[in-house]
Amino acid sequence: MIQTDQVLEFDKIKEKWRELALTNWAKERIRDIVPCMQEHELLARQRETSEARKLLEKNGNPPLVSLDGIRESIQTAVKGGCLSISQLEELEKALVAVMRIKDYLSRSKQWEISLAYYEENLDYLDDLKETISLQIRYGRVDDNASKDLKSFRDDIEQNERSMREKADAVIRANKEILSDHFSTLRNGHVCIPVKKEYKHKIKGVVMDKSSTGNTVFIEPGTVGKYYETLQLLRVYEENEERRILYSLSGMVADSADIWKQNISMIEKLDFIFSKGKLSLEYDGTEPRIHTERYIRLEDGRHPLMDSSECVPLQFEIGKSYDGVVITGPNTGGKTVAIKTVALNCMMAQCGLHVACKKAEICMNSNFLCDIGDGQNLSENLSTFSAHIVNVLEILEKVNRDSLVVMDELGSGTDPTEGMGIAIAILEELQKRGGLFLVTTHYPEVKQYAKHKSRIENAKMTFDKESLKPLYQLVIGEAGESCAFYIAGKMGMSEGMLKTAMRAAYGKDEIPESLKQVVAGNHLQEKKGPGIQKRKSRNRGAQNAREFQLGDSVLVYPEKKIGIICKTANEKGVLRVQMADRKIWINHKRIKLHVAAEELYPDDYDFSIIFDSVENRKLRHQIDRGKKIEGQITMED
């Protein structure tokens, strides 16, 4: 059921529905709603929805409120517990809400709507409400809740006044030894601030001192005698308040049965009115419910789609045919059409109005759907495998009272084999009974439906000129994919379409109407970004070889000048003659300062610079043809 909810988007309908409810009970019932299987109960649910909508239209929204927490308070009172002031205030508000909804329903009786008579099941417990409102006010037990409480509070006020007066008298008599000229409370005692060095001049008890220690707070003896009396009076006050709260809690407990009835009725009304509010949102209509295998929708709409943009659906099944095979181009609305039918039927069987001008809907024992690719990654099933698994599960559950919707029948595999599987599925659906709607692209399936009794073709209309789907379902005619027209309109060349015609139908002649569409179409070659190869690993050595023997270079990071005395090896490392030494260095750390050709003539002998005197003499002897034993070694 959960999967079907999601496939048909009924879960989204329920989410909108839940937002219109106020009580947790109604929200939970909406979340767990399933199609009703008892005809008399379903008819009652539909009647409730219709009456709720009528009252909303005639009398406005009912003054319903959430009663969360009220049940817990009643249970506490029944168990003999003492309700808090805030709990009693919430109960009073709840009774006011009961009174208002009772008045709303009473005024609605003038239209002779049976839902209005639910008012007779509500009791706003006027005596209890009045008692609570008199004894609990502004978040506290009111002074006049009882004579004793009034007397205790008057005595407390008198004692507090006397304590202040005595403290003020001490302050007036001892201004020169005080830090401030007013009394203050310390741990519930009225104290005066006395300078530390004069604390012995005031008779009384030190209650506190300042953070600096320079001031002590003393309760004068004349004030202290009132403190014990005041504490005793406050105990009396607290006991009397508790007695009053227990008395009110007892009254609540005595009326527990009425409270439970009120709460249940408010929750039920909340659920019923939420259906009426939802019907108003999508301009719903009460369908005629029956148990015959027949469905008819007039101006049907998908309730989640904007009604101003949705093309009304005219649909009928069950009298002359039990199955409908819908064909037509992609994005033509085939899937929306079968979802619209199934979703409206499911909503109707859950007691909701349907998004139609008029509807006759049969009760269905189950709603079986195969829409979407259904790919199951967790079980490593391909799109086609998952599709077949789902289809086989559906075929096992189908009976005479089922409603089956399947999208893209037989898709996801070899077209020839997929077509055969699609026909086999249709055969099995018809054997098992029930009503079914399927979509397909296979022309063979269209031919099968054309010659098969109790199965009817249908198509989604399409405007070939504008390439826009019209979203209109026409039962009795098979649709065409319009793939060649769409491809031609989008720019495919005549040659490519001829190849496609030959592959599809064994002939490469295309209709004259299509020739006009593709006239002048040709594919243009558009250059994209070029591929950039990665740099060779020896690229550094190649750059290094740009430096020549005798080049004057700057050596980084010191930026000292040197002369290339040996060109780069395969790793891009060169030998540089510095002022005091020769160094090996990577070409990336040097920069050309002055080229050798600008410093030396073409036939310059660099050995004068880089060779030692001994080596130059030996080299000179070799040039003169003398035989020298040993090996001339260039200085490293």
Image (cartoon, rainbow, N blue to C red):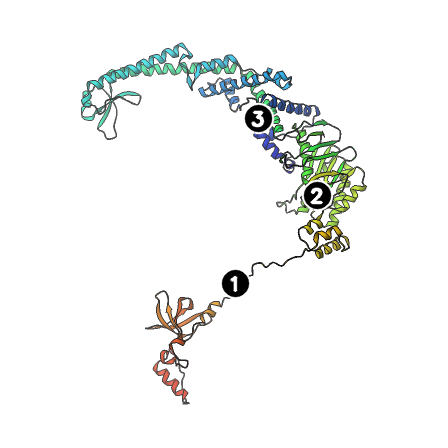
Seen at 75% across and 29% down, the residue is 292
- Residue 247 against residue 498 in the figure, above or below: above
The residue to which callout 1 is attached is: 534
Residue beneath the point at 72% across and 38% down: 473
Mark closer to the chain start, 3 or 1: 3
Q: Look at the numbered discs 3 and 1 and tell me whether their residues touch, using CB distance below 8 Å.
A: no
**Residue 509 numbered mark, or none:** none
Q: Nearer the viewer, mark 2 or mark 1?
A: 2
Q: Secondary structure at mark 1?
A: loop
Mark 2 surroundings: few (<14), some (14-19) or many (≥20) residues within 10 A: many
Badge 3 density bin: few <14, some 14–19, many ≥20, Cα 10 Å = some
Q: CA distance from mark 3 to mark 1?
A: 67 Å
x then y, percent, for residue 577: 36, 73
Instruction: Identify which residue, 451 or 226, lies in the foreground.
Output: 451
**Residue 451: % across, % down:** 81, 42
Q: Label 3 amino acid?
A: Trp
**Residue annotated with mark 3:** 25
